[in-house]
Image (cartoon, rainbow, N blue to C red):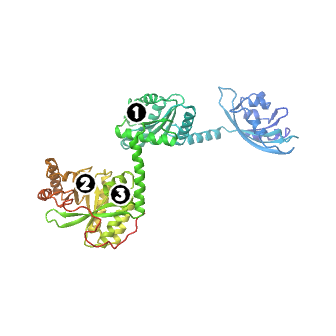
Amino acid sequence: MTSALPKASTILASLGQAAFVWDLATDAMVWSDHAGAVFADIPAASLSSGAEFSKLIEPQRNIRSDALSHSPAVTRGESAPYRIEYGVRISTSEPVLWIEETGCWFAGSDGRPARAQGIVRINNERHARDEQLLRLSRHDPLTGEFNRTHLIAALTETIEEATRFRTSCAFMLIGIDHLARINDAFGFDVADAVISEVARRIRIRLRGGDVLGRFSGNKFGLILKNCTVDDMNVAAERFLAGIRDEVVPTKSGPVSVTASIGAVSVPRYAHSANEAINRAQETLDTAKRRRAGSYLVWRPNVERDAQRKVNIRVTDEIVTALNERRIVMAFEPVVEARSRQQAFYECLIRMKQEDGQVLLAPDIVPVAERLGLIRLVDHRVLELVVAELAAAPEVQLSLNISPDTTMDPDWWSSIESLMHAHPGVAERLIVEITETVAIQDIDDLRGFVTRLKNFGSRIAIDDFGAGYTSFRNLRKLGVDIVKIDGAFVQNIARSADDRAFVQTLIDLARRLGIKTVAEWVQDEESAVMLRDWGCDYIQGRLIGLASSERPWGAPAEVVLPAAG
């Protein structure tokens, strides 16, 4: 091997490589002639033996000998391949030279390594790429902080250590307030600059050992080790002040920024990373709702925990009732205010429970909206109402849906297919949009209203006066009917304020060409007032409350399959 080395040395040197033979018994190393060109500035003495060469190796000096000694034994004369990577540094002031060594060793009489030979090559570029890929897998590319995956891993490790050593730590979620507004006003590049600057301001205020990571678009996760509740409060104010007290300079000009913080003490109130994140997120959401730029610490809350158990139970009850067809309709009459002739019936949801009890709409709809189940409920109500209309051609019915459902493409597909399948139904259908839930996009809702009206259906805003819709939006939406919230109607015979309010609503609606329905009409005196003010329709206790019996007397003959 030794005599063969010079013949290949020129080729190896041109490739940035050098060959060697290492006699393990004497520890002597023999290199190809041009090894000095590969290992520039490394003294020849450092290449003369395995021991001397190992003094230059980082991070583990014995990596070469370990690669051989830890290999399984082979028969004498046979060889075993190996491949290792390591760094070589002449002095602390010099950069590391990254080496890839590929070779094989030959066994002695005992089957263990006696001689090794191989090739080394400079691998700086590949190592740099690998380091960059490793960094990208662990860090957020915008801020350079830990990404979410490694932040959670660090939080898990911190909680385990705190539990084992009985120490107290904290986990915080720091959310930049109104980042979407910055995106809209200045563009995403400015928002990115804000995120980077906020990360920098948090980082320079950390103690040694604390961990910062980017949790999501506008949120940072922060692990404060060995941190009491008092320490947490002081740190939170330090972070908030550091973010809000100076504007953020950007290419579009200075931007004023605030942040809110939700925090939880671990492991006292969170025994896992998932629990800590959920509770910090919960408190952050509450802090943002309370006031932008505020700070809140998670505390046990018996009422909140009890409500969550109720939510879980009610969710299961609603889904089960949907699956078992225990969602049914009750029908409340709406009559013309002057003639008292029947105009239409409002379909109100009922849920039959397994014990025979019946839950009314106020028990079902708010919970379904809060828990994200209203879409499923509205789908079922649509099927039931269309079945009634198809079976009773002389009847006009109204149904209630949430504004969120108007944005649901599946609901629109359902009503579109049902209208086509049952000609004449659309003209007898009134869709009531609940006004107590904020309408997020008035233009999208207007498109929904227009499409329904093109089918021939009418649109009503329910509970008007109790929520968010203005007369300006009524005109923009082009609704046909306004149903005045019963809370203002029920006492008009005794309340001057309610009388003024209701009379004003009726007058404004009439000027816009919109029909009015007064809900919760309790007595004849109120009905006469409403009639004289020009109210078009009335409903309530005076006219008759909702009943599961069909007032028109005929059972529905059309059965539609449940959606989804």
Specify few, some or many for label 1: CA neighbours under 10 Å numbering under 14, 14-19, or 20 or more: some
Residue 472 percent location from the top left of the image: 23, 51
Which of the two marks, 3 or 1, is nearer to us in this view?
Answer: 3
Name which residue type carries label 3.
Thr
Q: Disc 3 versus disc 2: distance between alpha carbons?
A: 17 Å
Q: CA distance from mark 2 to mark 1?
A: 45 Å
Q: Where does the N terminus fall, quadrant-wise?
A: top right
Which tag, 3 or 2, sits closer to the chain's start? Answer: 3
With 169 as the anchor, is 75 left or right in this view? right
Q: Nearer the viewer, residue 213 or 545?
A: 545
Q: Is residue 554 above or below residue 445?
A: below
Q: Are marks 2 and 1 in contact (CB under 8 Å)?
A: no
Identity of the residue drawn at 53% across and 28% down: 208
As drawn, which residue projects farthest toward the left? 532
Q: Quadrant of residue 192?
A: top left
Percent from the top left, x then y, of residue 215?
48, 41
Number of marks drawn: 3
Task: Give the class, few, some or many, for how many residues have Cα within 10 Å of label 3's Cα (few <14, many ≥20).
Answer: some
Asked if one can make out residue 188 in the rendered structure from this viewpoint, the answer is yes
Kindly identify which residue carries mark 3. Answer: 405
Would you name the residue on which mark 2 appears?
463
Question: Given the image, on which type of amino acid does mark 1 rest?
Answer: Val
The picture places residue 196, in percent across and down from the top left corner, at 46, 36
Numbered disc 2: secondary structure: strand
Describe the element under mark 1 as helix, strand or loop: strand
Q: Amino acid at mark 2?
A: Asp
Whichever of labels 3 and 1 marks the residue nearer the N terminus, that label is 1
Q: Which residue is mark 1?
A: 248
